[in-house]
Amino acid sequence: MNHLDAALAARAFDLRRGVRRRTVRHRRLVSNPLAVVAWQLGGEPFAVAALGWGDAHAAPHRAVVGEPRNRDLLFAALLPFARWFNQRFEAHGADRERFRDGEDAFEVARTAPQVLVPNRATVELLGRLGRRLAYLPTDGPRAAPVELVRLGRHLRFLWENAAVPGQQLVVALTDLVNDHWAVPLSAIEAESLAALDAVIAPPGGGCGLAAAVEAELRPVGPAPDAEDEQRLAELVERFNADRAGRTDPEVVRRLLPPVVDHYRPLLRRAWDVLWRCRDREAPLTEAPSVGRRWDDDRVAYTRHVDWLARGGLRRTRHTPRQAASVLMRLEEAGRLLEAEEACDDPLVMAAAILADRAVRGTVTAVDPDHTEPGARRAVVRPLVTLRSPDPCMIPVGRDLWWSVQADGREYAVEDVRPTPDGWAEVVLKRMTSSGKAALPAVGTEACFSVFSTARRWLGRLPEETPWTHQGAGTVPEPLDGGAPAVGG
Amino acid sequence: MPQPAQSRDLDTALDERLNAIRGGGRPVPPSVRALAAYAQHTDCPLATLGFAAGVDFDRLLADTSLATPFGQSPFAIGRGRMFEERLRADGHAIALGLLRDPLGLPADAKAVNLRDGIPAGPGRMPARSVATATHLRAALAADPSAPHLLDGAVLPGEVGGRAAFFEADLLAAPPAAPLRVGEVKSFPKVDGQVDPDQFGPALDQAAVYVLLARRAVDRIGGKPDAVSDRVFLVTPQNVGLTPALSEVAVNARVRRVERVLEAVPAVADVAAATPPDITFAPVADRQADERTRLDALHSVADRVGTSYSPGCLGSCGNARFCRGRAVSVESPCAIGPAVERLFPRIVTLGRAAALSRGAVPTTDEAPAAELLARAGRLIDAVPVRSPS
């Protein structure tokens, strides 16, 4: 938390309401997302008890398992979801455009799917479900339906991709809302989407804090509420007793309604909150850099569907080599995201100014012809003088980037002079003489920050993994096997 | 060992005092779970008092709007029980089969369930701890008839100067090797990994048993290194109930547990420092109306003192009550320690908001006020573009 966020949180507390901490929307929200809400059973991390899904608020679909600890019942209930999801998820892969990256050219899907879930915990649950389904055998005595295996691989990909900062293929609403709102709640409380929604838009317009205290008692999954589970336990017990080991659809259809009735309001609640929060963010203007990140998402998505089409599998644990390159990619994505958000949004940049990582002010002088001795002959190094209304503590020599050309060349801080009125005069030197890059005009406002949005060369890993990083690989095993769980 | 009469009288007086604070009812014994929860609130006088007197904070505010839902899912409980029963079936055949090679147990290893054959009642835990000590003595003496696996061993400990009993899931005694402490958990191990959020607390729990087992061994004349700090965890493998073994050395955790136990204030001191008329009785009274109960807790909290932080929400039954108090006085701790640190000597969040709008700071507030005012100016300079 920085001082700007703290000030916003104090103001939000003062108003008893959430306040915006972003002026633009920093994530894409597509018009037809694949929204999913889920509930699990206590102590069963690799199964879902109830699922709600759909691509519009008004048209939810629902699956209730009845006895999630029974593999046949679970898989049968998941099948309609898998068919719906796979079809929509894979459809984006058909329409391609040519993409050029330096010397490489490749085909990339024009659009990509976007999965919406209420919170991080749902992403984790879908990832675990994906782990369970993705590696199941599709032939032999315990064959699993092909659709479920495909679903598993998609979910596994989404879960893995969710670690990329700023990715938009799977959006957890708690992350989206917390990124865009300052709320008078602690980080733990702000993990509850119901509480977030209540504090931002309290029903009846009253005190947001009081509304959040009430709303947090009505969770939106996937972890079940203990009291709900007490009621559910009786229903499941009766369901199991009545079906007496049978799993055929006819019996299940007849016995399931009480369990469905239990989950109907829970799914509805999660579904409504999810869409309410999404629809609140959607009208906001999209930040300029979102498109660049969406391109990355499309590339990641295309790679996944192509890899899948070739029958490729993913390791469940990275090799040391993979781990190193993944970490490098994640760090670079995080750096770019931070820089792009700051350059896209004056409220984000304000935090950087406060932390002496940026300086803004009025351009008072520009010397485009300033020269200084170079390695062999004199070179042009234009100077820009900025009058900042804040004291500036950035050290001389620090590289800064002009926020409207953040992917261009750096400016070095040449001189910082405090003025008697508490302001500061900052002289910046552009480190290239290239005539292509424009300079700020005298009299305009400009902002220079440590944020560069240029992509960096990520280096290359050694051809051979050093012995320090050689570990044992693991072969994924199907999770279903060994002694059966309860509810057989 | 017979105790001097005077000490027994003192104990009785202390018991009565604690009983009065608790307002009747059986005290909550200091279990590993209670200890772990308390370890996060050592700076809270109310939590300290409740822990010392054995007040059930999880249920104290039950049936009020501020109750914290801490119940466990019946499915999770059922799963845990089923897994343990599987391990125990047929003379612990599955457990012994799993542990035999990794721990070096003999082919004809025997297990004994210390829960069996001891009647329920207040004397049950002491009796089981005596039985545990007998088995430990036999194991240390390399008695060939000694069992190799103790299921439900009870280890005596001392918390805040009061005797307490802790139940270890498994205690393995391989021949000619140190004793090994084990925990049984029902969350799965997948791809060679157990969910780290659950693994850590399980290891902390095992570390408590390592420490207490060492003390138990010490009392019967053995050396502390007769108990290994390499504990084992038995969890289901993948989604079924086939057991898998994980082994971890927990020496750092043992040292930490030792410090936590040492830091628990003596129950007698806590009782002596508590004003004589303090009691949780009217709070725990489920017949009384909510207002009366909460008012009673407010008056206790006012006099004893509290120390709320959002971390309390996950481990203390009074957290929602204390949060309400923090919010009503606009304390920065309501949002969290990070905000608190950024607002040194600014008493309320409302005041912080006012300073961000340019209010004149007092001398105390001055250090934090400047950045706040700058932050406020920067925020206000940004044109509002949001549609809502």
Image: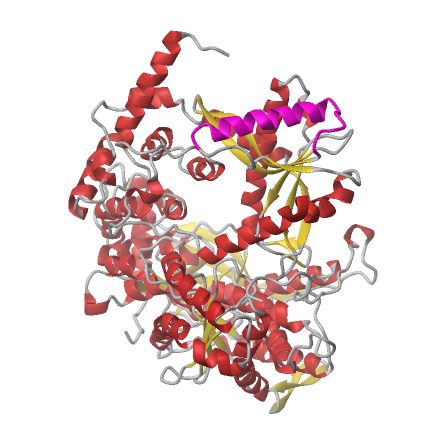
Question: Relative to residue A475, is residue A381 drawn left or right?
Answer: left
Magenta region includes residue B333: no
Q: Judge whether residue A404 can be spotted in this image.
A: no
Left or right: A206 with respect to A51? left
Residue A291, relative to residue B276: is it above or below? below
Whether the magenta-drawn stretch holds residue B123 is answered as yes
Query: Where's residue A14, x and y in %?
Result: 23, 55
Rendering coords of residue A95 (x, y %): 60, 92
Where residue A86 appears, as percent x and y from the top left, is 57, 83
Front residue (pair B167, B190): B167
Q: Which residues are magenta?
A: B121-147
The residue lying toward the viewer, choosing from B171 and B161, is B171
Q: Quadrant of the C terminus of chain A?
A: bottom right
* Marker count (numbered): 0
Residue nearest the viewer, comparing B55 with B90 = B90
Quarter residue A201 falls in? bottom left
Q: Nearer the viewer, residue B244 or A384?
A: B244
Residue in the image at 26% along x and 32% along y: B23
Task: Residue B252 in the image: state x and y as whole percent.
Answer: 61, 34
Q: Residue at x 61, y 91 (%)?
A: A94
Horizontal side, residue A466 vs residue A12: left or right = right
- Give the colouring mode of the picture: secondary structure
Is residue B140 visible to us here?
A: yes
| Magenta region, main secondary structure | helix
